[in-house]
Amino acid sequence: MARQKREKSSTGIYHIMIRGIDRNDIFIDDEDRERFLYYLVKAKEKSNFILYGYCLMDNHVHILIKEGNEEIGQSMKRITVGYVGWHNLKYL
């Protein structure tokens, strides 16, 4: 089942949760977490969003963020596509 369309926030602030397929782990070791944070920082530099907080769990991530120069979906795509590509090269 596809997720529902995201409602546009009047404040531009979003709680984003990113989860692995079938709730599988997305972070196996500390290098994985560091690489995810690398992509998070790179996206922040590009889109100038405000990062209020994050929590990296083994199989999911919580991010509290305020939209910057681009829509939130584009920022999340920038983070996740980069990390997933790196993760797949490492583990597949």
Image (cartoon, helix red, strand yellow):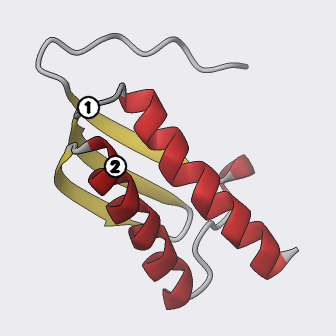
Give the residue type at disc 2. Lys
How packed mark 2 is, by other alpha carbons closer than 10 Å (few <14, some 14-19, many 20 or more), is few
Q: Quadrant of the C terminus?
A: bottom right
Q: Position of residue 42 (x, y in %)?
A: 38, 61
Above or below — where is 21 with respect to 29?
above
Q: Position of residue 77 (x, y in %)?
A: 54, 40
Element under disc 2: helix
Element under disc 1: loop
Give the residue type at disc 1. Asn
Whether the residues at callouts 1 and 2 have beta carbons within 8 Å, the answer is: yes
Q: Position of residue 43 (x, y in %)?
A: 38, 53
Residue 40 lies in what quarter of the image?
A: bottom left
Left or right: 29, with 74 as reference point: right
Earlier along the polypeptide chain: callout 1 or callout 2? 2
Above or below — where is 56 with respect to 51?
below
Q: Residue farthest to the right?
A: 92
Q: Which residue is more in the foreground, 6 or 84?
A: 84
Q: Residue farthest to the bottom?
A: 30
Circle on res. 46: 2
Above or below — where is 50 with respect to 84?
above
Q: Residue at x 62, y 81 (%)?
A: 28
> What residue is shown with label 1?
69
Q: Residue at x 56, y 63 (%)?
A: 59
Circle on res. 40: none
Q: Which residue is more in the foreground, 89 or 21?
A: 89
Q: Residue at x 43, y 43 (%)?
A: 17
Q: Quadrant of the N terminus?
A: top right
**Spatial distance from mark 1 to mark 2, Cα to Cα?**
8 Å
Q: Residue at x 60, y 58 (%)?
A: 82
Above or below — where is 39 with respect to 32?
above
